[in-house]
Every structure is written in structure tokens, then in C-alpha cells.
Image: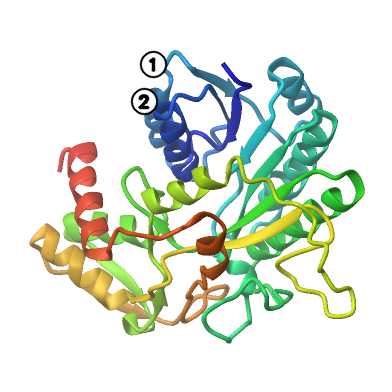
């Protein structure tokens, strides 16, 4: 069997689905997670429990902000491909400490471990939030992303810059993925699809920003996973045509690449709420509120580059995705 693939954040939402898919495809997977209590840890434990019965899955409970523990992980397993999805999420969370520890210190530890471990390809999670104050739509990797408006976004942009530096200095091939509003079964309880579904099902109020006149590029998790899996063996190469006099933010003279990964079809939050109401058979009790700091009115991914690179083509509509999520929610919560 080939060298195992490391998936960090394997007890998290996207990491769990990526690990599950890789195991299904016959890969050996080492799944690492620190089980931080940003949201209910029992959900993380439940995800992890579904991975551990696989005889090709190796669980690792580890805090990647600890440098020696991270180096030891790489010494024991000799990874060639790494999918780094562990992070402190959330654009509305304002305590900088957890972001610095999980998204900066841990990321540098990962870069160092990959560098010294001769990793052939590092795929890491960035975010659509890096576009920040940009108003040009759709968001394109070829446009600058230098005005983040949340601490989370700033750390994700820093990840991109650090990965590029390691690609330039040490030849570490790295691909950053800017995720756009991922949802689906086993999702994060702090995300809109989950919070709205739970509140409506329980007959509680939902907080609706800007009267629901907000658009998001909702992307079903299986589409995200398909894009990641297609990239695993597609390590970036230096672009010999990269022009330092007219630098393209998406490409580089180093083996580093950044891609948007999203649905490329923004939907209004009001429509999301209506779909959840229809699927649950209950009306929402709405309370309008202003758009929170760190949020933007609209996101939309230009996925031309990822489509060209690996044939990425999202296929799950919001209607179908919401139906699948609600079905999972009812089963998981016994609702």
C-alpha cells in the first residue's frame, strides 16, 4: 500500500467527509484532530467514531500547535500527501488567541513538518472570507485579496502567504483552497443551514441578517470533497510564464496555487429558509437583525480555474442538499 494520506481536522465537518471518501477509495488515512470545544465535541466524537472501524484508518488525537508532537506525527507515518483542514473557524468569533494558535502556529508547524518530511503535496484550507472588502463579483483568484474584515480571514490569508513562502524557499508544492459556504450532513452547528434547521424544528426564533437579503455560494460537501480528491495527485508546478512585473495572485514562479472551490451559483438566504421550512413542514419565527461585523452581503466563486485543472463541476442543487441535510438532522437528533 502507498504511503498514508494525512487528513487534519478529521473529526471536523469537511475533514470527516474527506477522510471517509479516501477510505472508500482504498487509501490508508491518518486522521488527526485535537477536538477543540468550539462547538459540541460530541458531534466531533460521533464523526470520528464512524471512521475508526476502518482497518485502513489510523486515529491521532493531537494538538498541531505543539511543534514536537507534529514533528513526531510525521516521523512515525512518513506522509507524501497532506490535506490540512484543521483550523479555528468562524468569521464572527472575535477572540484572536484561538485563531493565532490554531491557524498560525499550527500552520507553521505543518509547513515545517512537510518541509522536513519531504511531502510531495500539501493541500490546505483557505476561505472565501479572504476576499473581505472586495466587491467585484464573482470572486476570482486572479484579483487581490488584501483587505480581510475578520480575524479568521486574516489568518487564512496569512496561511496562503506562508505556504507560498515555503514553496518559494524550499520547493514545497502547496495548493490553497478557498471554500465557499460548505454545508451538508454532519455539518457545523454554527453554520446557517444547521442553526436555521434546528431552530425551526424546535419552534424557536431564527436571527436573519439584513432581512434575508444576503446571498451565499452554498456548496454541498460532496462537491467539495470531489474537488479535493481530484487535486490530491495534482501537485502544482512553478509557472514559467509568471510575470514579476504584473504578478498574478493565483499563480507563482514557485510551486504554489490557489483555487476557489464553490458552487458558482449564489442563493438568497431567504430561499434557503423557505426550503428548510418546506422540508420540515414548519414556518420559521423570524427576527431581523443588521449584518454582523465580518460578514459580507454576497459571495460568489469563479471556479473557472479549478474546472480547467481537474474538471470540477458542482452537481448538488440547494434543493437537494437541504433535503439531504434535513434527513440527516432528523436521524442524528431523533427529530
Using the rendered image of the protein, determine whether residue 67 is visible from the camera's viewpoint: yes
Disc 1 is placed on an element classified as loop
User: Percent from the top left, x then y, of residue 182?
Assistant: 43, 57
* Closer to us: 98 or 303: 303
- Quadrant for residue 133, please give it: bottom right
Looking at the image, residue 164 sits to the left or right of residue 33; the answer is: right
Looking at the image, residue 276 sits to the left or right of residue 9; the answer is: left
Disc 2 is placed on an element classified as helix
Q: Is residue 193 above or below residue 210?
A: above
User: Percent from the top left, x then y, of residue 201?
Assistant: 17, 55
Residue at the limit of the structure toward the top, as seen here: 55
* Closer to us: 118 or 132: 118
Q: Is residue 276 above or below residue 289?
A: above
Q: Residue at x 50, y 62 (%)?
A: 307
Q: Which residue is mark 2?
A: 50
Q: Which residue is mark 1?
A: 53
| Label 1: how many Cα within 10 Å (few below 14, some 14–19, many 20+) | few
Which quadrant of the figure contains the N terminus?
A: top right
Asked if marks 1 and 2 touch (Cβ < 8 Å), the reply is yes
Amino acid at each position: 500500500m502507498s504511503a498514508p494520506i494525512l487528513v487534519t481536522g478529521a473529526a471536523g465537518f469537511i475533514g470527516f467527509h474527506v477522510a471517509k471518501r479516501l477510505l472508500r477509495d482504498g487509501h490508508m488515512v491518518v486522521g488527526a484532530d485535537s477536538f477543540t470545544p468550539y462547538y459540541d465535541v460530541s458531534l466531533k466524537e460521533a464523526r470520528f467514531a464512524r471512521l475508526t472501524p476502518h482497518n485502513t484508518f489510523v486515529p491521532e488525537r493531537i494538538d498541531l500547535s505543539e511543534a514536537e508532537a507534529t514533528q513526531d506525527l510525521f516521523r512515525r507515518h512518513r506522509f507524501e500527501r497532506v490535506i490540512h483542514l484543521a483550523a479555528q473557524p468562524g468569521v464572527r468569533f472575535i477572540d484572536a488567541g484561538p485563531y493565532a494558535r490554531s491557524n498560525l502556529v499550527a500552520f507553521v508547524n505543518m509547513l515545517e513538518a512537510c518541509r522536513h518530511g519531504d511531502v510531495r503535496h500539501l493541500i490546505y484550507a483557505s476561505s472565501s472570507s479572504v476576499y473581505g472588502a472586495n466587491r467585484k463579483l464573482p470572486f476570482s483568484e486572479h484579483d487581490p485579496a488584501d483587505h480581510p474584515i475578520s480575524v479568521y480571514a486574516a489568518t487564512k490569508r496569512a496561511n496562503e502567504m506562508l505556504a507560498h513562502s515555503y514553496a518559494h524557499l524550499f520547493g514545497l508544492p502547496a495548493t490553497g483552497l478557498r471554500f465557499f459556504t460548505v454545508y451538508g450532513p454532519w455539518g457545523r452547528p454554527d453554520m446557517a443551514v444547521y442553526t436555521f434547521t434546528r431552530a425551526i424544528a424546535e419552534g424557536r426564533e431564527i436571527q436573519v441578517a439584513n432581512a434575508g437579503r444576503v446571498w451565499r455560494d452554498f456548496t454541498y460537501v460532496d462537491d467539495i470533497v470531489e474537488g479535493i480528491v481530484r487535486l490530491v495527485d495534482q501537485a502544482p508546478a512553478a509557472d514559467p510564464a509568471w510575470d514579476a512585473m504584473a504578478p498574478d495572485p493565483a499563480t507563482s514562479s514557485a510551486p504554489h496555487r490557489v483555487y476557489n472551490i464553490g458552487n458558482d451559483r449564489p442563493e438568497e438566504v431567504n430561499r434557503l429558509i423557505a426550503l428548510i421550512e418546506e422540508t420540515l413542514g414548519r414556518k420559521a419565527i423570524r427576527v431581523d437583525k443588521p449584518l454582523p461585523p465580518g460578514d459580507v452581503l454576497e459571495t460568489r466563486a469563479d471556479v473557472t480555474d479549478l474546472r480547467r485543472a481537474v474538471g470540477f463541476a458542482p452537481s448538488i442543487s440547494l434543493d437537494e442538499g437541504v433535503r439531504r441535510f434535513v434527513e440527516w438532522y432528523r436521524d442524528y437528533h431523533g427529530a
